[in-house]
Amino acid sequence: MDTGADEQTLDAVDEFRRANHLGAVDHSLVGRLNQHVSDRAASPAEYISGCFGHHDLVFLGEFGPSLQGARFLTELIPHLMDAGVWNLGVDWLLADDQPLIDLLIGAPDFDPDLALNLVYRWGIRHLSINREHVEILRAAWAVNRRRDPGAPNFRVVGLDYDLAYDTVTDTADLLQPEAWTHLRDRGPLSRFMAMVINTEFVSRRARALIAVNTSHALTQYRRPVHPEADRIDTEIDNGRVLGAGNHVFGTMADRVKTVLLHQPLTGTPGMGPELVFPADGLIDLVFAAEDGPKFPVGFDVTGGPFAPLPSSTAHESPALGAWTGGYVFLGPMGAMNAATPAPEAIGEDNLAEARRRTLAGSMRAQTTTLGALHGAMAVQASVTELIWQTVGR
């Protein structure tokens, strides 16, 4: 991106800091942060690939599916292969479908219908069936077509498991906590993910990028429970959330690393915005300044001036370095887009199944039409973009 002040972001951060009584910005600190990025940053793909020089597993944490995040993963796959990293674990595919995933990306020809169905099988839960996820699978298939003879296949590994829909009624609202004691019949997702990671990667001494929601990408840090965000599908121990990364860190320690994509944090319940700028907005100020570093970029947090930055208004408010060892800035939050919905994944032939697999009770009724499900997917994408655009307000 060309240099030049991002007035929209500067105004949003200024309003956020004033509303939350964060005081005047330390411009000398902003200068040191700017210099750190300018001196040490690399392209996001180069940065992530370079992390494997010292780590076997890299957890890449994302706030939620975004157009930019998915495109970054698509572009990253060839770089991973060139770095000798042949595995990508994702939380938007099912481990139950692993034989089909392997078949898809190892086949002579790419099957877009199979790819879309694999993406649908997980994404229908949240009305988040995205075309960019199909393209990630296509990118994995493509690198396998050009790999050297004798080199291993690049693999994409599903980390979630299919919910036990037979244990609940077809009209139950699956966004209620009581449903999840039945739906998660194979135990907490965090432990299941950790088991898959151990089986597919650790036990085989294979390096892997693990691209998951931030709740499962944290390794050393255990965040406090949020009364709304952690109502369902969350493992809790002594008031702290346990994600897959926490379990894996318990056995692998410094062989794993967390890298976060730029994202909002949950605010303190009942005390201001629902979502707030990380590091009290200083990261955004650095990149929005007229003389700010170009992006997208990736850089280390550990041992540098970003590490001690607090997030005073967040529900989880330790220093940035407690959260993550690395950071990838793809763009300002106000410019982030939702991933592209793929309504063609749902037709009259699988309408009944789609209703059954959707979590929202309003969509599970037998009277829910195909048009209603397609419309709900479009609304979900619009809401996602609105969330990005209203961080800190």
Image: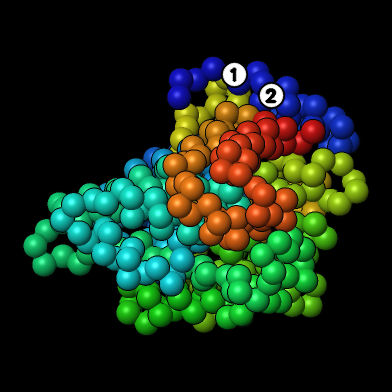
Q: Amino acid at mark 2?
A: Leu
Q: Kindly indicate the quadrant of the structure image that contains residue 302.
A: bottom right
The residue under the point 49% across, 41% down is 343
Residue at the far left: name it. 149
Q: Position of residue 44 (x, y in %)?
A: 42, 43
Q: Residues within 10 Å of mark 2 (few under 14, many from 20)?
A: some
Which residue corresponds to mark 1?
5
Q: Position of residue 158 (x, y in %)?
A: 43, 65
Q: Residues within 10 Å of mark 1 (few under 14, many from 20)?
A: some
Q: Nearer the viewer, residue 184 or 71?
A: 184
Q: Position of residue 102 (x, y in %)?
A: 29, 66
Q: Please state if 8 lies on the left or on the right of 110 as rendered.
A: right
The answer to whether residue 88 is visible is: yes
Q: Amino acid at mark 1?
A: Ala
The answer to whether residue 377 is visible is: no
Assign a secondary structure to mark 1: loop
- Of mark 2 and mark 1, the one earlier in the sequence is 1
| Gap between marks 2 and 1 measured at Cα | 8 Å
The residue under the point 58% across, 48% down is 127
Q: Position of residue 163 (x, y in %)?
A: 58, 70
Where 77 sits versus 13, above or below?
A: below
Which residue corresponds to mark 2?
10
